[in-house]
Image (cartoon, grey):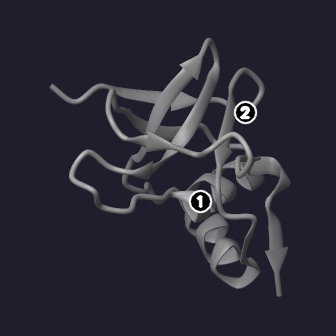
Amino acid sequence: MIEYIYLSWDKNKLFGYEKIKSFDRIAQYVEYLKKGDEFPAVSVKKIKDNIYSLIWVGENGDGLGGHKRAIAHYIANKSLKCVLVGKGLVVPETDKISIKDITLEI
């Protein structure tokens, strides 16, 4: 059974591993959110209470992500729908970055 959780930005912290993302694409996602669109869930692993990480490499060795969706939800101040996974590699400590600190490139 898939377990969905909703991360709220005032109660939870989410880390990723990509330090720069495209402003234009994120802006599009924010507009979709404002119109009421929903996005597929982002795969995350719980690190400890209220701290989560995007999955770097999934169970099957596939690269996962969700940075753009996470940033757009953060900017729009909307809870982020996530799938809580038990397996998968998370961001190495030296490479992790808080979603709110990722640079948007024009």
Q: Position of residue 12 (x, y in %)?
A: 68, 25
Furthest toward the left, the residue is 1
Secondary structure under badge 1? helix
Distance, label 1 to label 2, CA atoms, is 14 Å
Q: According to the image, label 2 marks what residue?
A: 9
Q: Could you tell me which quadrant the C terminus lies in?
A: bottom right
Q: Nearer the viewer, mark 1 or mark 2?
A: 1
Q: Is residue 36 above or below residue 25?
A: above
Q: According to the image, label 1 marks what residue?
A: 67
Q: Amino acid at mark 1?
A: His
Categorize mark 1 by other alpha carbons within 10 Å: few (<14), some (14-19), many (20+). many
Query: Which of pointers 1 and 2 lies earlier in the amino acid sequence?
Result: 2
Q: Position of residue 65 (x, y in %)?
A: 48, 59
Q: Is residue 15 above or below residue 52?
A: below
Q: Amino acid at mark 2?
A: Trp
Q: Could you tell me which quadrant the N terminus lies in?
A: top left
Give 58 or 7, whichever is nearer the viewer: 58
Q: Picture quarter containing residue 40?
A: bottom left
Residue drawn at x 62%, y 12% is 49
Residue drawn at x 58%, y 30% is 52
Q: Picture quarter containing residue 30?
A: bottom right
